[in-house]
Image: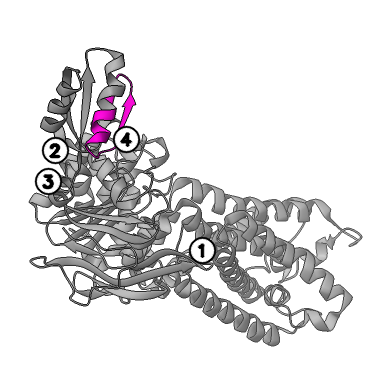
Amino acid sequence: MIRAFRSELLKLRRLGMLLGGLGAMVGFSLLAVILTVARADSNGRGSVSIAALSQPDGFASILQRGSDFLGIFALGVVAVATAQEYSSGALRNLLVRQPHRVRLIAGKTLASVAYVVVSVLIASLIALLAAELIMPARHVDTSAWLGAGLGITASTVGNLMLAAAGFGVFGALLALIVRASAPAVIIGVAWTVVVENLLARAWPNVGHWLPGQQLSAIVAGGNDISGYTWALGLGMAFVAAAAVAGSALFRRRDVAV
Amino acid sequence: MIVLEPTAAPSPAGDPPGVDAAVRTRGLTKVYAGRAAVDHLDLVVPRGRISGFVGPNGAGKTTTLRMLLGLVRPTGGGGEVLGGDIADPAAYLPRVGALIEGPAFYPQLSGRANLQVLATLGGFSKARVDEVLEVVDLRDRAGDAFRSYSLGMKQRLGVAAALLPRPDLLVLDEPTNGLDPQGIIDTRAMLRSFREQGITVLVSSHLLAELEHVADWLVLIDRGRLAFQGPIADLLAGRTASLLVAGESAADLEVIAAVARGLGHSARVVDGHVHIDEAAIAADLNRAAMRAGVTLTEITVQRATLEESFLAVTGGVQQ
């Protein structure tokens, strides 16, 4: 599995992937910072007040605003990396060199997930740096973010990384099912953004049991739909189930590409 | 020569006499949606030789190779590769190199990076990557993106990937597909060099002529079933011969054809010649034609090509 992990990292480290994946995550994190600054006002009639941003959880709230995109992006990156093996035909070469299929897919998925998790961390740190530079111009006091709020900021980044890992595993499962990048990403986005949100709004109790809603609740540290502990437990159970289902499917299915 | 009728049962005796098999299957079968792509195939590939695996497009060659490489699960039957059961491909794949259905690599990565991905996965050194690039003469272009390669270069990179594990068995699926004549000649030379190194080579093609000059052993399949397997010399020895005959005038041709039919053989007039299905009657035909008042100006013995022998075995049309 370690060889599969290292082999996948060799593939992922190519310049285009680094610029495309990491660059998009950094770009969107910066956009979240800029939009928050632009819409912040002193009386809170905008989306957020300057006073709220100056609180210890001010930066955490900015990260949470961009979390849905980062999750979807993590799903997309892992889905594309996995499905590419089918579309390029490279999978048959890989399986000749590593016939233990579960080791192969586990190593590859771990590498892809590690890539998106590290990308989320880097994007968060760059967003923090940018916010520290920009916010004082709007009279936002950021001293509490890394002072009294250091724990909140760190745990939010950690939760964001955890959720990205979960979305990544879901992306891998979708890619293994449909064996093509575009359908896997479309299905993942449609389910997460459209289907789950509609179900959760129509029937809040249903949202309590949906996988994407749990990962969103983890980033928020718990929300109206699920408490943090529930979301963490159920969300990770979904992720584990997806990993087992994907491995079983990959192990059994003929490779005819 | 070993010829099995399509409906023949798997041979209980195992390998043909004197053959040390690197690959052998017994009753190997793969059924897709009720249709047998491979149908009770008893295949033998001798060790240390070049074996041609030939059949029309859709005959089941690639499906068979995929089963030997653990990519596709057989519906029935079984087999061994390098002494390992095909139900456990991990037992033998570290000693097998393969190029299946054309070279498939990541288009954005360079040739070298593509090989490094596979070398890392297989536990081979970076130095081995450079060695195989040297073997296929790709070192100068190894840093270029795979997508920029010509078809011939892509094929060579595929062969390089197959050579990474220093294989005892090399499985190459249509390695000359799309190559120009020089590329085909180079590929044949490469196959011979592998044989000289003691590597068993199993190379598939839908064109028998491509393998005629390089293979020692042939396996012919048609519609998923074994049509022939054995030394290529056996297939050549079994070739039939016919006569091509001409007379002094066009009017003589029908007379010659009638004379040949009178001797009990099939004859037809085509393009200024009479084609007769049996070469052994040349002397009798000459005498009979003289008696009929016709002087033969040309008698040529025509041996069936290997392709025609193949078609006679499979009873079909080679694509």
Does any portion of residue A98 appear in the rendered image? no
Helix, strand or loop at label 1? It is helix
Helix, strand or loop at label 4? It is loop
Crowding at mark 3 (Cα within 10 Å: few <14, some 14-19, many 20+): few
Q: Is residue A63 depicted above or below B131 in this figure?
A: below
Looking at the picture, do discs 1 and 2 lie on one chain? no
Name the residue type under label 2: Ala
Asked if marks 3 and 1 touch (Cβ < 8 Å), the reply is no
| First in residue order: circle 2 vs circle 3 | 3
Name the residue type under label 3: Ser
Q: Mark 2 lies on which chain?
A: B
Query: Which quadrant is the N terminus of chain B positioned in?
Result: bottom left
Does any portion of residue A241 appear in the rendered image? yes
Residue that carries the numbered disc 2 in the rendered image: B280
Image-based side of A53 in relation to B170, left or right: right
Magenta stretch in the rendered image: B258-274
Instruction: Find the distance from the CA under tag 4 to the CA under tag 1.
Output: 44 Å
Q: Is residue B244 depicted above or below B164 in this figure?
A: above
Q: Can you tell which mark lies on residue B193? A: 3
Looking at the picture, do discs 2 and 3 lie on one chain? yes
Q: Is residue B158 depicted above or below B288 in this figure?
A: below
Crowding at mark 1 (Cα within 10 Å: few <14, some 14-19, many 20+): some
Q: Mark 4 lies on which chain?
A: B
Query: Which quadrant is the C terminus of chain B positioned in?
Result: top left
Q: Can you tell which mark lies on residue A128? A: none
